[in-house]
Image: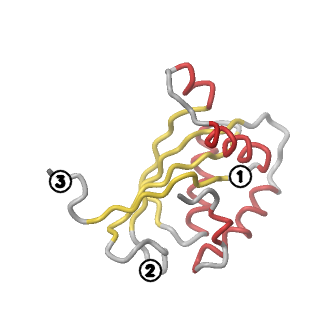
Amino acid sequence: MYPDLRLARDQGPLRNLDAAARLWQAASMARPQHVYTLLVEIGRKPGDDLPEGATGGALVCYAAGVDEAEAVRETVAVLKVAGLAPLDVSGYGTLDERLAEGHDIADEDRGLMDRALRENAVIVAQMTPFFDGDGDD
């Protein structure tokens, strides 16, 4: 698990994440922010720090934004600055929306969501690499 890409900032292209985070935090906080759960599919890119042999991966991210579209845009921008290659983003809504749908949200995830809101940040809660043959029976 990668609780926060910034923790790995000294490893490869992830060191650029601090600069992206500072730019994002400089954005206006005038409108109320929400935290959105996003699933980001990533492809391969030289220097992306994915495991050898991986064909890509998936990231579960908690991203702050005034709406889901902003959270998606900011997440994609931050991941690109971090040297990753986002291909597709699926949104799963805010904490309240997920709870209304009956999702069970662990305390650790709630803490990461709170941190994303407090820091106006993108938090990578989970990274799963994909390998050839994943999902084959």
Identity of the amino acid at label 3? Asp
Residue at the image position 23 percent from the left and 52 percent from the top:
135
Q: Which mark is residue 121?
A: 1
Q: Residue furthest front?
A: 107
Q: Are marks 1 and 3 in contact (CB under 8 Å)?
A: no
The disc, 2 or 3, on the residue closer to the chain's N-terminal end is 2
Q: Is residue 37 left or right of residue 136?
A: right
Cβ atoms under marks 2 and 1 closer than 8 Å: no
Q: Position of residue 88 (x, y in %)?
A: 42, 52
Q: SS of the residue at dot 3?
A: loop
Q: Amino acid at mark 1?
A: Ala
Gap in angstroms between the C-alphas marked 2 and 3 = 26 Å
Front position among marks 1 and 3: 3
Residue 122 or residue 32, whichever sits in front: 122
Few, some or many C-alpha atoms within 10 Å of disc 3 (few <14, some 14-19, many ≥20)?
A: few
Q: Which mark is residue 136?
A: 3
Secondary element at image label 1? loop
Name the spot of residue 109 as percent of width and height, x first.
61, 42
**Mark with earlier residue (2, 1):** 2
Amino acid on which the number 2 mark rests in the picture? Pro
Circle number at residue 46: 2
Q: Are marks 2 and 3 in contact (CB under 8 Å)?
A: no
Quadrant position of residue 20: bottom right
For mark 1, does the 10 Å Cα neighbourhood hold few (<14), some (14 to 19), or many (20 or more) residues?
many
- Identify the element where label 2 is drawn: loop
Q: Residue furthest left?
A: 137
Q: Residue at x 59, y 69 (%)?
A: 82
Residue at left offset 73%, top offset 68%:
18
Please, is residue 9 above or below residue 129 in the view? below
